[in-house]
Image (cartoon, rainbow, N blue to C red):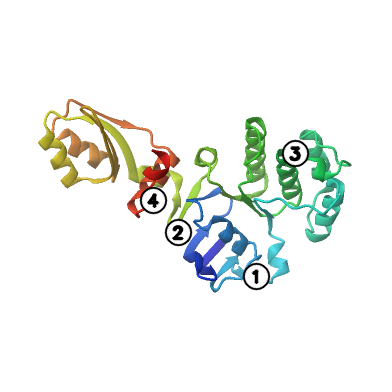
């Protein structure tokens, strides 16, 4: 298990990570989402021991990560800006990582390179952005680590390759208890793979919960009322996060239990009322809107 305990990190006057505490359970896909500048990349660098926290700690199975080489053998970190040695080939990078990770599988590396149709002898600096991302994933999976930190790893991959990588992650999780930690601004990419999400905002953590639990607590519905007084009464009774009206149709995003929400709506004998599926993107907008992040300035 990865555990962050009251972790903070500042760069001059900028507080990039502000007193974050969260747990990442083994064998589950953890999605780290957040607004631009929320601290996702900084948190991953702290979790990887690249940066030292100003306060607090990040631990893997009860051992601090920073300046602990043996602990770092438990994870492979893929940064947003992939880096490879100058003029190196995939084989050269594989040999480098084989010396760092005791369980690095040369056979696994070769098979994945063939599966992705990448040339092991070709200079990496001639690869496209997507090919470099693929190589990073291949090296990471070949390292056979318990955890993999992925910072915008799907960015640059075409749709087929994205699904391929997700399938590989799922297979690794089934076979050996692999745990991916994925930071991304593309919420739709995470929704179909994540078990747990951590929502960062302005350096702090808004929530860290199972995705199913989050969806069980926030709901979206369409409804039409017979009288304007009805919607005013509903507003007093329900915790409405977002309200939108087009003609007589209200679209409400509400926090609470589905049964209680529908009971309150139906108590006012609406003309029409229907629950709708709620996406991870809508949850993100709802939660950040509650904390004062004016998302409408961006999406309107």
Disc 1 secondary structure class:
loop
Whole-Å distance between the Cαs marked 1 and 3? 33 Å
Disc 2 secondary structure class:
loop
Q: Quadrant of residue 121?
A: top right
Label whose residue precedes the other's in the sequence (1 or 3): 1
Quarter in which the C terminus is drawn: top left
Please give the residue where the numbered disc 2 appears in the rendered image.
202
Label whose residue precedes the other's in the sequence (4 or 2): 2
Whole-Å distance between the Cαs marked 2 and 3? 33 Å
Please give the residue where the numbered disc 3 appears in the rendered image.
128
- In the figure, is residue 22 to the left or right of 151? left
Q: Name the residue rendered at 30%, 32% in the picture.
A: 275
Q: Name the residue rendered at 80%, 39% in the picture.
A: 113
* On screen, residue 250 above or below 89: above
Please give the residue where the numbered disc 4 appears in the rendered image.
288
Residue 66 badge: 1
Label 4 crowd (10 A; few <14 / some 14-19 / many >=20): many
Label 1 crowd (10 A; few <14 / some 14-19 / many >=20): some
């Amino acid at each position: 298990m990865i555990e962050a305990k009251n972790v903070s990190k500042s760069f001059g006057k900028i507080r990039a990570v502000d007193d974050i505490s969260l747990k990442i359970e083994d064998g589950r896909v953890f999605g780290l989402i957040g607004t631009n500048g929320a601290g996702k990349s900084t948190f991953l660098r702290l979790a990887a021991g690249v940066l030292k926290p100003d306060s607090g700690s990040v631990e893997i199975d009860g051992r601090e990560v920073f300046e602990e080489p043996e602990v770092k053998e438990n994870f492979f970190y893929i940064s947003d800006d992939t880096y490879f040695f100058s003029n190196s080939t995939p084989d050269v990078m594989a040999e480098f990582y084989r010396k760092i990770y005791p369980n690095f599988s040369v056979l696994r590396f070769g098979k994945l390179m063939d599966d992705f149709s990448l040339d092991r002898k070709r200079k990496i600096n001639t690869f496209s952005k997507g090919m470099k991302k693929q190589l990073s994933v291949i090296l990471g999976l070949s390292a056979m680590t318990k955890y993999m930190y992925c910072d915008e790893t799907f960015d640059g991959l075409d749709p087929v390759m994205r699904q391929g990588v997700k399938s590989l992650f799922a297979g690794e999780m089934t076979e050996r208890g692999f745990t991916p930690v994925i930071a991304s601004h593309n919420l739709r990419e995470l929704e179909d793979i994540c078990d747990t999400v951590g929502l960062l905002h302005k350096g702090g953590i808004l929530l860290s919960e199972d995705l199913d639990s989050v969806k069980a607590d926030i709901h979206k519905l369409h409804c039409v009322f017979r009288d304007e007084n009805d919607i005013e009464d509903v507003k007093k009774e329900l915790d409405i996060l977002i309200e939108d009206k087009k003609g007589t149709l209200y679209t409400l995003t509400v926090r609470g239990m589905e049964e209680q929400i529908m009971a309150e709506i139906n108590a006012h004998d609406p003309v029409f009322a229907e629950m709708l599926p709620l996406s991870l993107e809508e949850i993100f907008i709802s939660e950040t809107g509650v904390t004062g992040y004016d998302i409408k300035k961006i999406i309107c």
